[in-house]
Image (cartoon, rainbow, N blue to C red):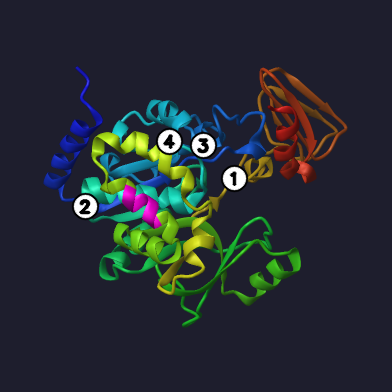
Amino acid sequence: MELSLNKRLKLLRRSDSMAKIKDFALIMAGGKGERFWPLSTDERPKQFLNLFSDKTMIQLTVERLEGLVPINHTFVVTGEQYVGITCEQLAGLPRENVVVEPMGRNTAPAIALSAFYIKKHFGNANLVVLPADHLVKDVDGFRRALRNALDFIKKNKDAVVTLGIKPDRPETGYGYIKFVKENEDVKYNETVLRVERFVEKPAYEVALKYLEEGNYLWNAGIFIWNVDTIIETTRRFLPKTYEILNKLFELPEDSYEQSLKELYPQVDNISVDYGIMEHYDRIYVIPSEFGWDDVGSWTSVERHSEKDEMGNVAASNVYYFKSKGNIVKTNKKTILNDVEDLIVIETDEYIVISSKKSAQGIKDIKKEVGK
């Protein structure tokens, strides 16, 4: 007979108290990946696709946490429609470690909901919050940065540590973090510096200025903080969300799922950057280099894929003649002749052909024809 959710949680809490491990991870996996349409769909978005290897993005995310956070202390917050595929792709993840959002309300309430959930069922914990669909090439460097962040949080419980990526180009598609320069000896993946402010996606000229000034980092959306800090900052800066979630977790456990569906749509629809990070004064950053990319569009895949001598993304079933700088992902044998800078994507339902410069617009096309 299958155990109820409450009984499974009690068993997990019992094993957790024996292990006495205080580091947890929360993987945010609610995104739709619309810029990767038609390969990424509402039923199977980007985080569940294998864009770079035989493992999917969410599988790679869990894998790089090995040695830092055990699988039974790893949580995934996602939509109800993705619970099945999450459990299917993460075979060792307990079902009760999937925190379900009845509807998407952006990252701040998703993180707060998860913090309340973890706090209630597992007690005090430090929490690594990270997206499910980013790329990390230097896994050892990533783990070193996280270890240093967790060490800092253990000594400074009310702080928030984020991992900021050293920029190598004036990127306009990322947010930035300005840190306080204390000295010139910055050890990447190790040094902890105070954050002065978060900056939204800048114009090209502004991004170029940030690159020249040298004390701006890309915002990777990775945060390390204690669950009490998450809950307290939610109370201070998003009081409506706090009151709703606090009410939810004061109710009897057997009414949780129904009450969640009724109450959660009322929380603030706001990102954690806008809702909390721009207001809190105890934020620190570790300048980091570990081959990070947020894989925001098909051009991100190009940056990290093998290419031929003409800059075309290489594939065994694609033949290029007098063509350069193209990205092709198809099932059939495909021939490109005398063309440049195209994206060609094939699925069972669609063939999409786009210029690379219009890659970001694929999201808007999906809204028109991919209903």
Q: Is residue 140 visible?
A: no
**Highlighted range, magenta:** 242-247
Which SS class for mark 1? Answer: loop
Quarter of the image that includes the C terminus: top right
What residue did someone put label 3 on?
47
- Relative to residue 257, is residue 141 depicted above or below? below
Say whether residue 111 is left or right of residue 303: left
What residue did someone put label 2 on?
123
Q: Which of disc 1 and disc 2 is earlier in sequence?
A: 2
Name the kind of residue labelled 1 in the image: Val
Residue 77 % position (x, y): 41, 41
Say whether residue 152 is left or right of residue 370: left
Q: Main secondary structure of the magenta part?
A: helix
- Report the front residue among 107 and 143: 107
Specify the label residue 364 is tagged with: none
Quarter of the image that includes the N terminus: top left
Name the kind of residue labelled 4 in the image: Gln
Residue 128 % position (x, y): 37, 53
Name the kind of residue labelled 3 in the image: Gln
Specify the label residue 295 is tagged with: 1
Q: Between tags 2 and 1, which lies in front?
A: 2
Cα distance between the residues tagged 4 and 3? 9 Å
